Image (cartoon, rainbow, N blue to C red):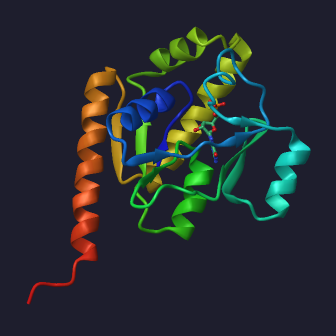
Amino acid sequence: MLIGPGGVGKGTLAAELVARDPSIWLSRSWTTRAPRPGERERGAYVFVDRDEFERVVAQGGFFEWAEFLGHLMGTPIPNPPEGADVLLEIDVQGAEQVLAKRPDATVILLLPPSLEVQAARLASRGDDGAHIRRRVDQGIFEVERGRTIAHHTVVNDEVGQALGELTAIVERTRTAAQGAAKPEDT
Ligand code: 5GP
C-alpha cells in the first residue's frame, strides 16, 4: 500500500511503478467526489454517487472504504491476474483496515520534502486556498498516524529517486515473501 498526505505524489509514483513492472496490479478505487480535470478520461477512479457507493458497501463489495474530507473512497474486492502483486493507493484509515485483514501487507509512507512543497503541488492541480489548507491539515494527520503503521518511509523530493527507492522496497518485499513461502531447508 502507498499512503501519504494529499499532494505527495502517490498517484504519479503508483502509475510509474505499474508502467515499469507489469506484475504489479494497481487497484482502481471508487469515489463519491467529483472528478478533477482529466481524471475521468484516464480512469483515475470509478466515479459514483453516494447512494451507489452505499449500495456496494451494504453488499460487502469493498475490501476497505473510508470517508476522506467528506467523500467516500473505497477499494473494490481486488481481482488481480494470477500471480500479480496488488498495489493500493489509499488513505491511512483504509490502510489500517487492509492490515487487519492482511497482516502480511506492506505499507509505504510517502512524505513530501516540506509542507510548502506539498501545498504548492496541491495548488498546481487546481485546488483552491481553503481546500489546500484542509488537505495540508489532513496531511499532518495522515503522516502522524501513517508513521505508526508504515514499514517503509520514502521522501518524494525527486520522482526518479523516489521511484528507485520504491522499486528496491518492492524487490526486497518480494524476496522476503518468497523466502517465507518456501519450506525450511533441512
Ligand atoms: P484524492 O482526492 O486526492 O484523489 O484522494 C484523497 C485521499 O483518498 C488520498 O489519500 C487517497 O490516497 C485516498 N484514497 C484513494 N482511493 C482510496 C480508497 O480506495 N480507499 C481509501 N481508504 N482511500 C483512498
- For this rendering, which residue is in front, 119 or 55? 55
* Residue 178 position within the rendered picture, expressed as x and y whole percent measured from the top left: 25, 67
* Residue 8 position within the rendered picture, expressed as x and y whole percent measured from the top left: 48, 27
Horizontal arrangement in the rendering, residue 7 relative to residue 158 (left or right): right
Numbered-mark total: 0
| 174 is higher (above) or lower (below) than 165 | below
Q: Residue at x 28, y 56 (%)?
A: 173
Determine which quarter of the picture holds residue 166: top left
- Which quadrant contains ligand 1? top right
| 59 is higher (above) or lower (below) than 149 | below
- For this rendering, which residue is in front, 4 or 9? 9
- For this rendering, which residue is in front, 79 or 115? 79
* Residue 127 position within the rendered picture, expressed as x and y whole percent measured from the top left: 67, 14
Residue 40 visible in the current orientation: yes
| 112 is higher (above) or lower (below) than 46 | above
* Residue 183 position within the rendered picture, expressed as x and y whole percent measured from the top left: 21, 83
Q: Residue at x 64, y 27 (%)?
A: 135
Residue at the far front in the pictured view:
82
Residue at the far left in the pictured view:
186
Residue 111 visible in the current orientation: no
Residue at the far bottom in the pictured view:
186
- For this rendering, which residue is in front, 153 or 20? 20
Horizontal arrangement in the rendering, residue 15 relative to residue 59 (left or right): left
Quarter of the figure with the C terminus: bottom left
Determine which quarter of the picture holds residue 73: top right
